Image (cartoon, rainbow, N blue to C red):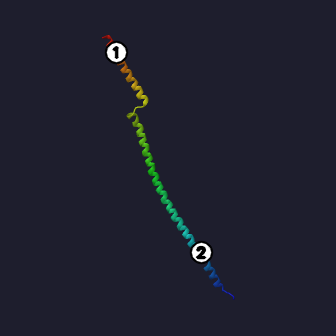
Amino acid sequence: MTFSLEAYQAIMLAITIVGSIFGAGKAFFGRIETSLKDRDDGLKTELSKMGDQMSKESEAIRQLDREILKLKAELPREYVAKEDFVRSFTVVEAKIDAVQTTLTQFAKEK
């Protein structure tokens, strides 16, 4: 069995085969491109969400910083350091001792 083709038939067959291969390749790579585009869009939305979350957390950190600085400013006014208390209490004890000494001297004189 002999298979013979005219020149135009061979050219048309070659064009059909090349066109089919080209169409299949284009469809395949079109799907890959669509998949990559969807993945990129998903990544963009995730990155924007992360950026928003980071800005919210950054603002929360700044707020905590402000509160800590405010607390540091208020602490000396509201609380007394241990050394300051001991010093003040020593002065009060010295004054009480002086009053007691004075009272005992008055008591001895009478």
Residue 89's tag is none
For the C terminus, the quadrant is: top left
Residue at x 44%, y 46% (from the top left corner): 62
- Disc on res. 22: 2
Residue 86: where, in percent of width, then height? 42, 27
Q: Answer few, some or many: residues within 10 Å of disc 2's Cα (few below 14, many 20 plus, some between 14 and 19).
A: few
Q: Quadrant of residue 19?
A: bottom right
Placement of 103 over or under 77, stated as above or below: above
Q: Specify the quadrant that holds the N terminus.
A: bottom right
What residue is shown at x 37% (from left), y 19% (from top)? 97
**48 to 97, vertically: above or below:** below
15 with respect to 101 (left or right): right
User: Which residue reaches farthest right?
Assistant: 2
Task: Give the residue at x 49% y 57%.
Answer: 47
The alpha-carbon separation of the residues under discs 1 and 2 comes to: 118 Å
Left or right, residue 60 beside residue 10 = left
Tell me the kind of residue under disc 2: Phe
- Callouts 1 and 2 close, C-beta under 8 Å: no
The amino acid at mark 1 is: Thr
Q: Would you name the residue on which mark 1 appears?
A: 104
The location of residue 68, given as percent across then percent down, is: 43, 41
**Furthest-left residue in view?**
110
Q: Residues within 10 Å of mark 1 (few under 14, many from 20)?
A: few
Q: Position of residue 90 (x, y in %)?
A: 40, 24
- Nearer-N-terminus badge (1/2): 2
